[in-house]
Image (tube, grey):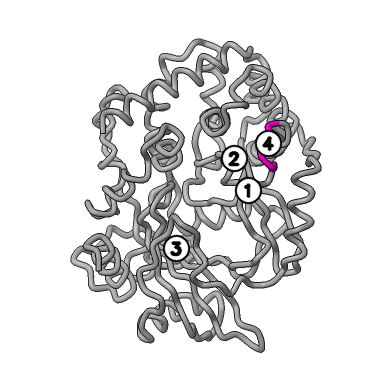
Amino acid sequence: MHAKATLLMTAAALLITGACTHSPLRSPSSDGAATPALDAPAALETTPAEIDLRSLYPELSDAAFRRKLEGAQTPLRFLRSFAPAYYRAFALQKNSLKAPLLKASEFQGWCAGDAHPENFGTLLDDSGNASFTYIDLDDSGSCSVFSDILHFVLATRLQVEDLRDRESIEGIIEAYLDGAAGRVKLSKPVRALLSRAEDKDYFDEELEDFGSEVEVLSKNISQPERRRLAEAFAADFGKVTITRATRFAKTSGGSAAQIRHRTILAHGDEPVILEFRTLTTPAVYHERYEPSEPRTRTLHALKMTAPRGRSKWYAVRELNGKWLLASPRYKGTRAVELKKDADQDPELMLKIVRDEAAVLGELHSRGTPEFGSYLHSIRKLQLKDWESALSSMEAALERVRKRR
C-alpha cells in the first residue's frame, strides 16, 4: 500500500474512533451542545505574493497537503483547489481597487464561496423534484458578494477559452443582474438537465463508482466505525444501521484529501444511500469576516441554496471533534459537466454559464442585507472595471501559484 494512502486511512480511523491527541476549542452551538470552534487563520501577509498556502489548511496533514498541491498544476486547477487563496488575495488587494470597484466590494452577504461552472447542478428533494442551484456547500458563508461573482467570472474565463471575450463577459454579468432582480429564466440545455434529473429520483447504489480523481481507501469500514457514524446522527435519522461504508478521498479540487464515507443505511423497506464528509474552514473566512459555527453555517447554506426545501437526509453533527455533513446520494443530483453537457458547443456553454450566473445573483439577492445599494454599485461598473478586476486577481493568484 502507498504511504499516502496509509496516512489518509490512519487519519480517517482517528476521525471515527476519536483517538486524537488534541482537544479542540469549543463554543456554544445553536442547540445548546458544546461544539468545536474553527481555528482563526493567521494574518501575516501584506501582499498576495506572501500568502503561505500551507497555513490556509491547518486541518490537513503534510502528506494530504502535498497531495492537494499535486492536483493544482494549472491556473484553473489552482483556483478550484485553493479557493481560500483567492479570498485572501482579494482581501489584501481590495484597498488598491479603483473607486467604483472598491464601493462594490464593500457589501457583505451570503456567498457561494467556490463559485465556478461545475459547482452548480441539479438538486433533488425527497419527492423527486429537481432544482438548478449551487450544490457545493464547503466554502459558503459571509463575504464580499462582489468577490463571489468575480470568482465565478474568473473561473469561467480560465475554464473555457471561448468565453474570455468581452461579449461573453458582458453576457454573464447581464445574466447575474437579471438573477439579482428575480428574473431567472433557465435555458433549454439546463431545462434538459432538470428533466433528466427528475427521471432519476432514486438512490445511487454505486458506492465505488467515483471516477478517475478519487482514491478508495477502504471498501468497507469496520462495524464499530459504522455504528459510531450512525449513533452520531441518531438525533436526525433515528435508530438506523449502516450496513456498508466505503471510505475515500478526492485527489484534486477544493476538497482534495478530505476523508469521506459513502454508506448504505438500513431504513424501512428501501436502503438509503448517504455520503458523510468532513467540514473544514470555509474559503470565504479568509476575507476576515466572522464565521458562524459550522453546524449553523452549513444548515443556513442548505436553506439558501434550496429555498423550497431540502431533503430530510441532510444533517450536520459532530463526531470526535470533527464536523460531518450527511447528504443523500440521489442519482439525479449531479454537478454540471460543462463541456459534456453542452456537447463542446461554446454557444451552449455560455447559456449554461449565464444560467449559473443568474442563480448566483438570486442567491446574493436573498443573502445581502443592503442588496439595493449593492445592486446600484454593480450596475455603475463598466466592462473595463470588470476586466481590470479580473486581470488583477488572475495575476495575483498566478504569483501565489508560482511561489509555492
Q: Is disc 3 surrounded by few (<14), some (14 to 19) or many (20+) residues within 10 Å?
A: many
Q: Considering the numbered disc 4 on the image, is that residue within a helix, a strand or a loop?
A: helix
Q: Choose the circle earlier in sequence order: 1 or 2.
A: 2
Q: Which residue is mark 3?
A: 277
Real-space CA distance between mark 4 and mark 2, rounded to the nearest whole angstrom: 9 Å
Residue occupying the point 68% across, 30% down: 176
Mark 2 or mark 3: which is in front? 2
Q: Choose the circle earlier in sequence order: 2 or 3.
A: 2
Compared with 356, 231 (above or below) is below
Q: Choose the circle earlier in sequence order: 4 or 1.
A: 1
Q: Position of residue 52 (x, y in %)?
A: 26, 35
Q: Choose the circle earlier in sequence order: 4 or 2.
A: 2
Q: Which residue is mark 4?
A: 349
Relative horizontal placement of residue 38, taking residue 373 as reference (left or right)? left
Q: Choose the circle earlier in sequence order: 4 or 3.
A: 3
Q: Which residue is mark 2?
A: 117
Q: Which kind of residue does numbered mark 1 sit on?
A: Val
